[in-house]
Image (cartoon, coloured by chain):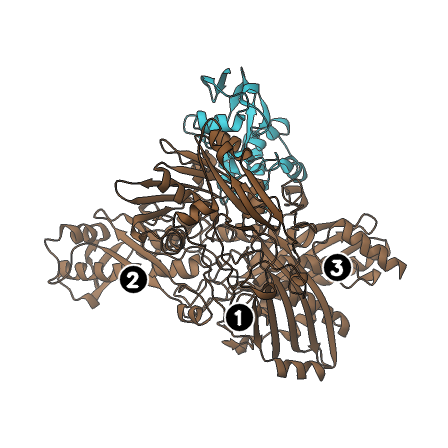
Chain colours: A brown, B cyan
Amino acid sequence: MAQAKLFGSSIKRREDPRMITGRGVYTDDVKLPGQAHAVFVRSPHAHARVKRVDLAAARRVPGVITAFSGKDLADGGVNPLPCGWLLPDLKIPEYRAIATSTAHFVGHAVAVVIGDSAYAAKDGADQVVVDYELLPSVTDGEKAVKPGAPQLHANVPGNVAFRWSIGDKDQTDAAIKGAARVVRQRLVNQRLIPNAMEPRASMASYNAATGELTAWITSQNPHVHRLLMAAFVLGMPEHKMRVIAPDVGGGFGSKIFVYPEEVAVSWASKTLGRPVKWTAERRESFLTDAHGRDHVTEAEMAVDKDGKIVALRVHTNANLGAYLSTFAPLIPTFLYGTMLSGVYRIPNIYCEVVGSLTNTTPVDAYRGAGRPEATYLLERMVDLAAKAMGVDVAEFRRRNFIAASSFPYQTPVAFQYDSGNYGPALDKALQHLDYKKLRAEQETARQAGRYLGIGFATYIEACGPAPSQVAGALGAQAGLWESAHVRVHPTGKITVFTGSHSHGQGHETTFAQLAADELQVPFEDVEIVHGDTAQVPFGMGTYGSRSTAVGGAAIHLSIEKIKEKAKKIAAHLLEASEADIDYAEGKFAVKGSPARHKAWGEITLMAYLAHNLPKGLEPGLEATSFWDPSNFVFPFGTQIAVVEVNPDTGKATLLRYVAVDDVGRVINPMIVDGMVHGGIAQGAAQALWEYAAYDDGGQLVTGSLMDYAIPKADDLPSYETDRTVTPSPVNPMGVKGAGETGTIASTAAVANAVIDALSPFGISHIDLPLTPARIWAAVQAAKKK
Amino acid sequence: MKIQVKVNGTAHTSEVEPRLLLVHYLREVLNLTGTHVGCDTSQCGACTIMVNGQSAKACTMLAVQADGAEILTIEGLAKDGKLHPIQEGFWEKHGLQCGFCTPGMIMTAYQFLQRHPKPTEGEIRHALEGNLCRCTGYHNIVRAIQYAAEKMAH
């Protein structure tokens, strides 16, 4: 049974055969006999009183079964959607799955039509008559909190959901006052729309005979969905609800949250006694998937005469949309303000955040969630400070790095970094790039009228959320541990049930590598099960790059328990003491007499035959563990973008992208590289193309794939990736998270590269996205100066 | 309306509404759910199939327009349990993560490699402009198609 070590091997994914042959099963692929289809009627207005919803004509349409208004759901016992992260003095507006009195954003559901087919339901939706009384609206977060702005909710005065701060204000103010140099910049981190390729969907099936509701949901965290939906929204016993998240086509955060549609179809299925399915059209994804980012920030960075950063002061308006989505208050606070030290020793930091409500789609976690916003801010400010001091941007960064000898390092903004060594990642990235040579080329190109730019992001990420006690103290309504159940079958085959959920991350492969390695059994003998509340112990799900660091650690713990019990059985059968048993290469052998041994399969069989077990030992061989980490893990790295900007057209072209990341020990390098690639593309897209634009009337003008610029293959280069390895001390495997590093770093790196390219024009900043129109306008304005 | 189509070698005769999209016909009537719907504006390419030897987005065609057509979907690409070299390439080179765009990517590559058996990286990237992927940043999709081109040349 001897085998090569699986930990660290780029094993091909076992998910792939079904997906490359069209046999994956996504939520919309699930079909049940008698299933009905839901189509939602949505407000075309950003802010309007819903005076009357007339469903009579819709109900008469052939193929329509019935239709429901918001009042029907409320009368039927459907409670408002909960907010799962409470800040002190947080104002929470009542978020109904279907609006009962007021529509607060374009796309807000006002009715749902149920038909025999989606086509019939759509015909019915066309016949729903809604009387709206238009109200003044506001879509801009800064305008929303000004006196005289239209008010969204009576219980949220001034549209301020919260005011939050972190750091020492007085010390920071004093440090800025006394500093040699202060750079100031207003920064817009624009709103983005996640656009996972699979639109959200859900299918609910209520069995009146058993009182059980089964819901297939495009979910990153099926147990969280079940808990919030059963206990808070639908008011049904949690054990009577089963949530299945089958193959899920990408999440990027947007499939964490409890949404109106899955609530409505669950209730409709129970009410009608037949399965009800809803699948978003892409235009609905644009209007109703939780958006990301949307910060406007005033930042000041103070530097001493030696080019050392002494203080950072930040004021941010975070536009949260019309309601508080499930984890909305967390993102611009504890995942943002806490990240503002980055990889730098900054003795004084103060950050205040105003969470504003506007007549827009709710905003919540989107890949990186708070950390890209912090990184963009910090890396832009570092570039401005380096420039002001006349220091090379790479050298300025190195000068301010937290020293490798300083870990664990306590930042002034709550986090204690577990480990880190930032210099080597920067060195490696500079080597890949041949930095000096490239700077010389840049100079030569400039002489020839070509504008190359080199942009850096030396970033840190906090992932693997998180220690439950810390999370609780910070306002989480849940601890953020993870579960794993490992079941060893009599024949020695293994099923691992994980509370994590894979929607592209490849857990079925990575976790099998981990388990097979630790149990020293063939890879093929391990099956990974996830995404079904009826099979898996309560799990927190996948987000914040936590699956391997937290979910993987839970698997490790269960395996330790299995090995311990197996060893007891082996010792008994071999008539040796437990301490004298070694487990290696799939064999339990007596130390010093390797001939006396029992194979893995003999032990697992005996665990179930059970007629010769140590006295008092229970039959069976399975173990459940809940791993609650002691801290976040902190991946870091250096990413560098090289761009060329054509000042005549304004077009920025990404020529090269170098990423040297430190995600600790890596189980499957191929999978990690793949996630880094995708993250880079998403972050670069924020820098150059993507932007959720609302007009003054609250219409989402970038509401389709024709208008919202997701990058295509020929917009992007191949990426050059490498790693340094600094194991995390927080979990037994030394792993960190790898799902978001690219997104966190690349927006800043690409933006810095474009600004660097334009520096001969005296341009020091342009707000994102750096579209040809914006670059061209900035160049024109600079030329006029 | 009555239509007759041959899908992955099997003949089907169906009564369909004139407005039924081809992609919904494949998914809902024939139960071939490997062809995905990712958008409503023909941008994402998740529904790409072959119709009479030409790649087409199944969300942009009505089922009735496919009357008499021969259709190849992702389910029909592997022969006798053996993966097509493009499918193999996607597996070997990690050309997929969530897998949702994958059937469309593979079907687009299928026609592209028929027309360009020895493509450059630039040609591959250009050929994928009608297919969106949110997971891979396209890097490994390009590698997968390069792998397939190499394999198909031998």
> To which chain does the residue with label 3 belong?
A
* Mark toward the start of the polypeptide (1 vs 3): 1
Residue A651 versus residue A46: which sits nearer the camera? A46
> To which chain does the residue with label 2 belong?
A
State the SS at label 3.
loop
Amino acid type, mark 2: Glu
Residue A187 versus residue A142: which sits nearer the camera? A142
Please rate how many residues cluster around mark 2, counting C-alpha atoms within 10 Å: few if below 14, some from 14 to 19, many from 20: some
For residue A420, the mark is: 1
List the residue tagged with mark 2.
A560
Q: Residue at 81% across / 53% down in the picture?
A: A777
Q: In the displayed structure, would residue B124 be above or below residue A383? A: above
* Mark toward the start of the polypeptide (3 vs 2): 2
**Mark 1 touching mark 3, by CB under 8 A?**
no
Q: Which of marks 3 and 2 is in front?
A: 3
User: Left or right: where does residue A243 sit relative to residue B13?
Assistant: left
State the SS at label 1.
loop
Image coords of residue A648 (percent x, y): 84, 49
Q: Residue at 31% across / 52% down in the picture?
A: A237
Residues at discs 1 and 3 both on one chain = yes
